[in-house]
Amino acid sequence: QVQLVESGGGLVQTGGSLRLSCAASERTFSTHAMGWFRQAPGKKRDFVAAITRTGNTVYADSVKGRFTISRDNAKNTVYLQMNSLTPEDTAVYYCAARMAYYNSDYSPRELDYASWGQGTQVTVSS
């Protein structure tokens, strides 16, 4: 399994921005599709965004136009740029990895991801 370590969380005011990073240990990072999920207190973990091994992206409707997922295969890192944050974005954010068997492979389902990071807290104050 891929070892994943998130960073970049913190406290920000409404309307602010944060950039999350997720560093992967695996040298075959480029063959994995990557996803970001989040879990707010008392709620289930929800899909946020995913990126295929070739860089195609997909987003949850709630973050579309505000969040951007990207990857740097040379650094084995995936990013989540979050803009125009609101208190509803407050959650623990997790990155996840799944082996991609074709270029367009991705999934919005957490059950399809084999590797997970420990999570990073994002808190947006009103």
Image: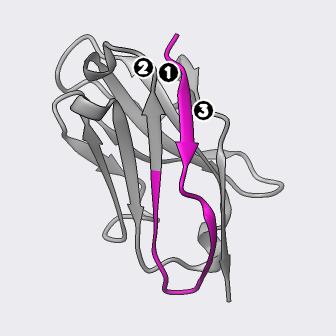
Q: Could you tell me the amino acid type at mark 3?
A: Gly
* Residue 112: mark: 1
- Where is residue 109 shown, x and y percent of the image? 50, 32
The percent position of residue 85, horizontal first and vertical second, equals 51, 77
Circle 1: residue type:
Asp
Q: Earlier in the sequence, mark 2 or mark 1?
A: 2
Q: Quick one: SS at disc 3?
A: loop
Question: Which residue is label 3 attached to?
Answer: 117
- Foreground disc of the pair 1, 3: 3
Could you tell me which secondary element the residue under label 1 belongs to?
Answer: helix
Tell which circle, 2 or 3, labels the residue nearer the N-terminal end. Answer: 2
- Nearest to N terminus: mark 1 or mark 3: 1
Residue at (72, 57) in percent of width and height: 40
Q: Is residue 38 shown to the viewer in this render?
A: yes
Q: Magenta part of the protein: which range?
A: 1-20
| Label 2–label 1 contact, CB within 8 A | yes
> Is residue 35 within the magenta segment?
no
Label 3: few (<14), some (14–19) or many (≥20) C-alpha neighbours in 10 Å: many
Residue type highlighted by circle 2? Arg
Quick check: marks 1 and 3 in contact, CB under 8 Å?
no
Mark 2 nearby-residue class (10 Å; few <14, some 14–19, many ≥20): many
Q: With 43 as the anchor, is 120 left or right in this view?
A: left
Mark drawn on residue 98: 2
- As measured in the structure, the alpha-carbon distance from the residue carrying label 2 to the one carrying label 3 is 12 Å
Tag nearer the camera, 2 or 3? 3
Q: CA distance from mark 2 to mark 1?
A: 7 Å
